[in-house]
Image (cartoon, grey):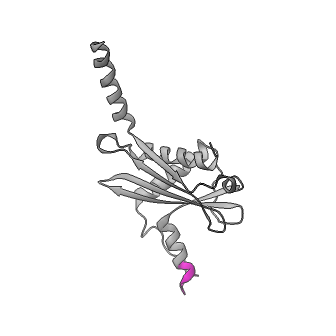
Amino acid sequence: MGSYSKAVLPGLISMFLIFGCASHEISKLKSDKIKTITGWHLCLTDEMEIYEKALDSEESGIKKSKQSVLLKCDVKLRDDISFYLTTKHKINLVKELKPTIGLIRADAECRWEQYITLNIFIYDWEHNRLAEIEVKNGEDVMVKDDEKFAEYCADVIAKVILSQ
């Protein structure tokens, strides 16, 4: 029995080190309303703030550069999540907000060059909050790399949108 545990325990530890560990919590879920939405627009919180400021300012007709305020790693995370949502989960992502389109807004927290949390807010066209998701990356050696974290986040978003 002792030799079995000596063989299994290192294998489990190695698996956790390779794949990392993450968790999520879903709150304020209104799945009936989510089911009525036909497409989704994914953006970062910083992108949404730029868009809203442009609408409120006198310079609303002038295009503002999002690249100047967005971190490359955050844009990559958003793009990776988009990739997994569209390819793995077949979720319809669109570029423009319009009726029957929902909004997925993501706010990432990064520490020591690794993502710690991703807070995701899901809204309908009228800006009613339909769900909140907090995805936490693992701690210490259990942290998922950026690509695996993006895939995990996409899986959680798909779970909420597809009501799985």
Residue 66, position as x, y percentages in the image:
48, 69
Of residue 40 and residue 163, the one placed in the foreground of this image is 163
Q: Which residues are magenta?
A: 54-60
Q: Quadrant of the N terminus?
A: top left
Q: Is residue 22 above or below residue 131?
A: above
Q: Is residue 120 above or below residue 54?
A: above
Position of 74 with respect to 143 (left or right) is right
Asked whether residue 156 is drawn in magenta, I would say no
Of residue 64 and residue 107, the one placed in the foreground of this image is 107
Asked whether residue 58 is drawn in magenta, I would say yes
The quarter of the displayed image where residue 71 is located: bottom left
How many tags in the picture?
Answer: 0
Q: Residue furthest bottom?
A: 58
Position of 18 with respect to 79 (left or right) is left
The quarter of the displayed image where residue 95 is located: bottom right
Residue 11, position as x, y percentages in the image:
34, 24
Q: Is residue 65 above or below residue 150?
A: below
Residue 20, position as x, y percentages in the image:
38, 39
Residue 16, position as x, y percentages in the image:
36, 33
Could you tell me which residue is drawn at 54 percent across and 73 percent down?
Answer: 51
Q: Residue furthest front?
A: 28
Q: Quadrant of the C terminus?
A: top right
The quarter of the displayed image where residue 99 is located: bottom right
